[in-house]
Amino acid sequence: MARSRFISILLSFFVMGCVPDASQVATNPDARQNFNHGDFSRFEFVDNMKPNSYSVVMAPSGDGLAERFYIDNSNCIRDDCNHNSFRSAKKGNIWDDPRPRSVTSPRQAWYSFEIYFPPELPYGMKQTRASYILTEFKENNDCATFSFGHVNGHNDNSMSVTLMTSTGSSDHSFVGSPIGCSDYYEGVVGNMRQLVGRWTRFEYFVRWDEVDGFIEVFRDGERVLRYSGKTCDNIQGCLTRNIPYYGIYMPNVRDVDNMLPASVYFRNVSMAQRREDLVR
């Protein structure tokens, strides 16, 4: 009996070692980086990453793996603690990419991501007043050049695209910030009520320019936004330090004690020169 039990345990060890399940993938740092991101640079965790907030798991829909990002009101990191901010996200490492900068930060390109909001996600009036920033590009001065997100604490269920500029002020937020940022454009691309509990695919085209920029956004194949005008403060910054991010980030939370936990899932985050080459 003991011999049979030993053999059974040994066989289980070898089988599990050859065919890792989703929980094993989640603890494998190499697997975290093996997603196909198209023309994007290799992604890495942000500096102020909330501990133990990221995992690679089976998608809620049961059709493959997805990246899960989670935040709550505990364990803020470094200067995020000074601004009541919490984040679990990845950023593109454009500095160590051996390719020309014109490839890693092109003047124009197509982008994609698929996002799943769990049914229990607190949003709108269910969450304390602060934004969910889900994907963004950051140019110089730490302002989000371009972002997808949702503003909580209001009776508004919109998911929007926002363009921002630096004001040089420190009084734009509830708890202060080293650099002030101001919205100069916001366009609705979805309603959170229709987005929770399902995968939604966004594909969008951006031409970066100080004057003659252009954005077009498609949600599940339907065009939901078209914008012409300024898309960045400084074209040199857009083409050298316009860093992509994705995950979940709540900056400048007004009431930390009443902030509820939140998680989102991502897959197929990619960049390409042609829409048909985006990862699916």
Image (cartoon, grey):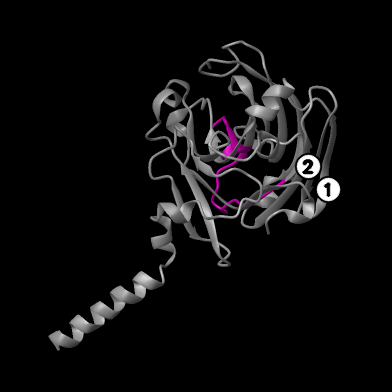
- In this orientation, does residue 28 appear? yes
Residue at (52%, 41%) from the top-left corner?
Answer: 90
- Please tell me whether residue 113 belongs to the stretch shown in magenta: yes
Q: Is mark 2 on a helix, strand or loop?
A: strand
Residue 152 lies, in percent from the top left, at 60, 34
Q: Which amino acid does label 2 sit on?
A: Phe
Residue 230 lies, in percent from the top left, at 80, 25
Q: In this view, does 275 lie to the left or right of 85?
A: right
- Mark 2 highlights which residue? 205
- Please identify the quarter of the rendering in which residue 168 is found: top right
Q: What residue type is labelled 1?
A: Arg
Alpha carbon of mark 1 to alpha carbon of mark 2: how far? 11 Å
- 107 or 121, which lies in front? 107
- Mark 1 highlights which residue? 223
- In this orientation, does residue 148 appear? no
Q: How packed is label 1: few (under 14 Cα within 10 Å), some, or many (20 or more)? A: some
Residue at (57%, 19%) from the top-left corner?
Answer: 173
- 131 versus 22 height, above or below: above
- 245 versus 232 height, above or below: below
- 131 or 143, which lies in front? 143
- 81 or 8, which lies in front? 8
Residue 20 lies, in percent from the top left, at 40, 68
Residue 250 lies, in percent from the top left, at 53, 33
Q: Is mark 1 on a helix, strand or loop?
A: strand
Residue 55 is tagged as none
Q: In this view, does 180 lie to the left or right of 165?
A: left
The quadrant the N terminus occupies is bottom left
- The residue range painted magenta reads 111-135
